[in-house]
Image (cartoon, helix red, strand yellow):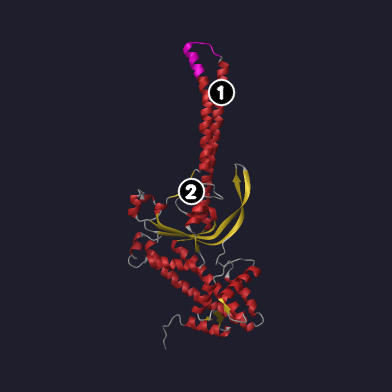
C-alpha cells in the first residue's frame, strides 16, 4: 500500500502525545498549549483568506448559483486563480491526484457492484479525482448465484471529484440535449465523498450508466440461442411437421407420441426461457443495488458539494498544516543537536510506527518550510533548529498581532 503524507490522527490527540516531552515542567506544558493555540488561530486565518479567494473565483462556475447571480461575477472570477488555489488547498490537506492509469484499472474491475459502467466523458472538458487516506475492510459479496464470499476491500477515506463540464456549443455538436442535463454547461462541479471502494470509484461520476457485462451477455444469450435452436430442431419443429404432414395427407399418426414430443419440447423451451429471464433479472437486481449504492453515497457518504466542499477541504488542510508544524517543532525542540531534514523525517516516522503502529510518509520539507515561514525554525548548513519555547510564544504572538495593522500609533 502506498505511504501517504496524510496523518490519520486528530490534532487534539497529537497535542496530548507531544505534551509528554514537557511533562516535567508545568510551565513549559502550559506554554506549549498556548503556542499550539496561537498557531491554530493563525492557520485558521490563512484558511479564511483561502476560502474567500476560492469563493470569489469559483462563483462564475458554481452550478448552485442562478444564471443571474453568476452574471455578477463576469470579469471578477478568474479560473486559473481558482484552479491554482484549489490545488494548493488539496496539497496542504495531503490529498493526492488519482492517476488516469489507476482510474482505468478501477473501471475494468468491480469489487462490490459487479456491473460494467459506461461514462460519457464528452460531457466534461476536464475531470480530476483526488484522494486522501485508505483503509481495508471485510465485505460479503455474492459469487455464483447464492454463494457468498468474504473478501477484503480497499477503500479511499476521502475522494474529491472535480468535473469541468463542456460548453454548450461543444455539447450541442455532440447532439447532447441540453435541457435534460442536470447541470448548466460550462459549470464546475465539486463533490467530496467518504469511504469510496477503490475498484468501484467510477460510481462517484454522476453520469455513470450500468450495462450488461460480457459475462452477463454470454450467460444470457449463449444458452438462449444454442439451447433454443437445439430444442426447436430436435423436438418442437419435427413434431409440428409430422402433425401437419399427417393432416395434409390424411395419414394416421401416433398422436400420443407426437403430442408427448411436442409437450416435452415446449416444457424444455419454457425452462430455458425461465433461465434466461432469471439471468436478465439478476442484471436488473444488480442495477437496483447500484441505484441504492448511489442513493446511499449521496445521502450518507457525501461530505460536501461545490462551494460547500471548500469548508471540508480547508478544515482538513488547516489541521494537516497544524499537525505537521507541531510535530516538527517538538522533535527539533527535544533534540540535543540540530537535525537534517532526513534525520527529522526518520525520527518522526519511526515514532509513528513504534508508538502509534502507523506507517506514513511524513512531509518533512513542507513542515520545515512552515516553521521557517512563521519564524520558529532556522536552517544552517543543512541542519535545522527551533527557537526556545518562550521565544517561540513571543514570535508567534507578534506575528498574530500584526495580521491587521489598522492602528499605526
| Residue with the mark numbered 1 | 263
Q: Position of residue 8 (x, y in %)?
A: 58, 66
| Left or right of 242 on screen, residue 52 | left
| Residue with the mark numbered 2 | 117
Q: Residue at x 35, y 62 (%)?
A: 70
Considering the whole magenta stretch, tell me its main secondary structure: helix
Is any part of residue 161 visible from this angle? no
Question: Residue 307 lies in what quarter of the image?
Answer: bottom left
Q: Residue at x 55, y 80 (%)?
A: 384
Residue closest to the far bottom: 409
Q: Determine crowd level at label 2: few under 14, some 14-19, many 20+ residues with C-alpha closer than 10 A.
A: many
Q: Residue at x 51, y 45 (%)?
A: 287
Query: Which region shows up in magenta?
Result: 241-253
Front-lying residue, 278 or 364: 364
Question: Residue 72 lies in what quarter of the image?
Answer: bottom left
First in sequence, mark 2 or 1: give its number: 2
Q: Determine crowd level at label 1: few under 14, some 14-19, many 20+ residues with C-alpha closer than 10 A.
A: some
Amino acid at each position: 500500500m502506498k505511504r501517504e503524507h496524510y496523518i490519520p490522527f486528530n490534532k487534539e490527540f497529537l497535542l496530548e502525545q507531544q505534551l509528554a516531552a514537557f511533562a516535567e515542567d508545568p510551565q513549559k506544558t502550559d506554554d506549549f498549549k498556548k503556542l499550539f493555540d496561537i498557531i491554530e488561530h493563525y492557520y485558521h486565518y490563512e484558511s479564511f483568506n483561502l476560502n474567500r479567494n476560492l469563493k470569489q473565483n469559483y462563483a462564475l462556475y458554481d452550478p448552485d448559483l442562478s444564471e443571474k447571480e453568476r452574471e455578477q461575477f463576469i470579469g471578477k472570477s478568474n479560473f486559473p486563480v481558482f484552479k491554482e488555489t484549489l490545488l494548493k488547498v488539496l496539497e496542504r490537506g495531503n490529498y493526492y491526484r488519482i492517476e488516469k492509469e489507476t482510474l482505468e484499472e478501477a473501471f475494468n474491475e468491480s469489487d462490490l457492484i459487479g456491473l460494467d459502467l459506461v461514462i460519457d466523458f464528452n460531457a466534461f472538458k476536464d475531470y480530476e479525482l483526488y484522494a486522501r487516506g485508505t483503509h481495508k475492510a471485510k465485505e460479503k459479496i455474492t459469487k455464483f448465484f447464492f454463494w457468498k464470499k468474504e473478501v477484503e476491500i480497499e477503500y479511499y477515506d476521502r475522494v474529491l471529484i472535480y468535473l469541468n463540464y463542456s460548453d454548450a456549443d461543444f455539447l450541442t455538436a455532440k447532439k447532447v440535449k441540453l435541457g435534460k442535463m442536470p447541470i448548466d454547461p460550462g459549470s464546475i462541479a465539486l463533490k467530496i465523498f467518504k469511504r469510496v471502494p477503490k475498484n468501484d470509484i467510477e460510481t462517484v461520476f454522476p453520469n455513470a450508466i450500468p450495462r450488461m457485462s460480457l459475462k452477463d451477455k454470454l450467460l444470457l444469450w449463449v444458452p438462449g440461442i444454442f439451447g433454443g435452436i437445439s430444442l426447436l430442431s430436435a423436438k418442437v419443429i419435427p413434431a409440428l411437421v409430422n402433425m401437419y404432414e399427417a393432416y395434409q395427407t390424411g395419414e394416421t399418426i401416433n398422436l400420443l407420441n407426437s403430442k408427448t414430443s411436442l409437450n416435452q419440447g415446449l416444457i424444455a423451451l419454457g425452462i430455458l426461457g425461465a433461465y434466461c429471464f432469471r439471468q436478465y433479472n439478476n442484471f436488473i437486481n444488480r442495477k437496483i443495488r447500484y441505484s441504492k449504492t448511489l442513493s446511499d453515497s449521496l445521502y450518507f457518504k457525501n461530505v460536501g458539494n461545490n462551494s460547500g466542499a471548500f469548508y471540508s477541504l480547508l478544515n482538513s488542510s488547516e489541521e494537516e498544516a497544524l499537525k505537521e508544524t507541531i510535530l516538527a517543532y517538538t522533535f527539533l525542540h527535544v533534540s540535543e543537536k540540530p537535525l537534517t531534514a532526513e534525520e527529522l523525517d526518520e525520527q518522526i516516522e519511526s515514532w509513528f510506527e513504534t508508538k502509534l503502529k502507523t506507517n506514513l510518509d511524513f512531509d518533512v520539507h513542507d513542515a520545515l518550510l512552515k516553521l521557517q515561514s512563521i519564524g520558529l525554525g532556522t536552517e544552517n548548513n543543512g541542519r535545522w533548529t527551533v527557537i526556545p519555547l518562550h521565544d517561540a510564544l513571543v514570535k508567534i504572538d507578534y506575528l498574530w498581532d500584526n495580521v491587521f495593522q489598522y492602528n499605526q500609533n
